[in-house]
Amino acid sequence: MALKSLYKEYWKTVSKEKGAWYADIKKAPPAQPWYNKLKQYNRKLIVTINRLRLGHCRTPSHLYKLQLVQNPTCPECQHNFAGLQHIFFQCPAYRIQRLILVCELDLVSEGVPVSQILQTLLYTEKYTNYFI
Ligand SMILES: [Zn+2]
């Protein structure tokens, strides 16, 4: 079996237990890091986006997983599991921030549709309906 096929199999197996959010975003291992074409961005931005893609950020669900908080509930709307999907796409408390994000992405998009930018950052088809 070719090395690439072995890596894909490893990706499938490991992603069931680790990096499930990222595996949901990216169905197959990337040939090159997503930021290869974005060398002009600073390291802090790339690290922040990588944390979002991996689900390793200060959401109640992740802090709960790390046993740093007592429950994964959203402090804004009391949704029982405040992960990235909830905060980015569902929480009614962040409607304005969501609108600002889309507007600001539109300003710097240079003609690329905002939905496409978000797909690039957090790709999975099930989330695009929130922005189209
Ligand atoms: Zn909420």
Image (cartoon, rainbow, N blue to C red):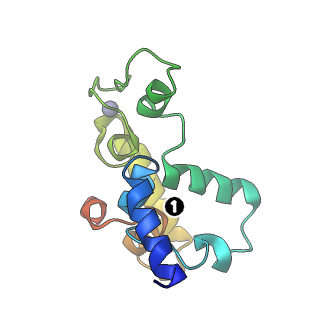
Q: For this rendering, which residue is in front, 126 or 98?
A: 126
* 6 relative to 81 in the view: left or right: right
Measured as percent of width and height from the top left, residue 44 is found at 72, 53
Q: Residue at x 37, y 70 (%)?
A: 115
Q: Residue at x 54, y 80 (%)?
A: 3
* Residue highlighted by disc 1: 104
Q: Residue furthest top?
A: 70
Give above or below for 130 relative to 9. Answer: above
Measured as percent of width and height from the top left, residue 67 is found at 49, 20
**Pointer 1: residues within 10 angstroms few (<14), some, or many (20+)?**
few
Placement of the C terminus among the 4 image quadrants: bottom left
Measured as percent of width and height from the top left, residue 37 is found at 65, 80
Q: Residue furthest front?
A: 1
Which quarter is ligand 1 in? top left
Is the residue at mark 1 in contact range of ligand 1, meaning its CB lies under 8 Å from it? no
The type of residue carrying mark 1 is Glu
Measured as percent of width and height from the top left, residue 128 is found at 30, 65
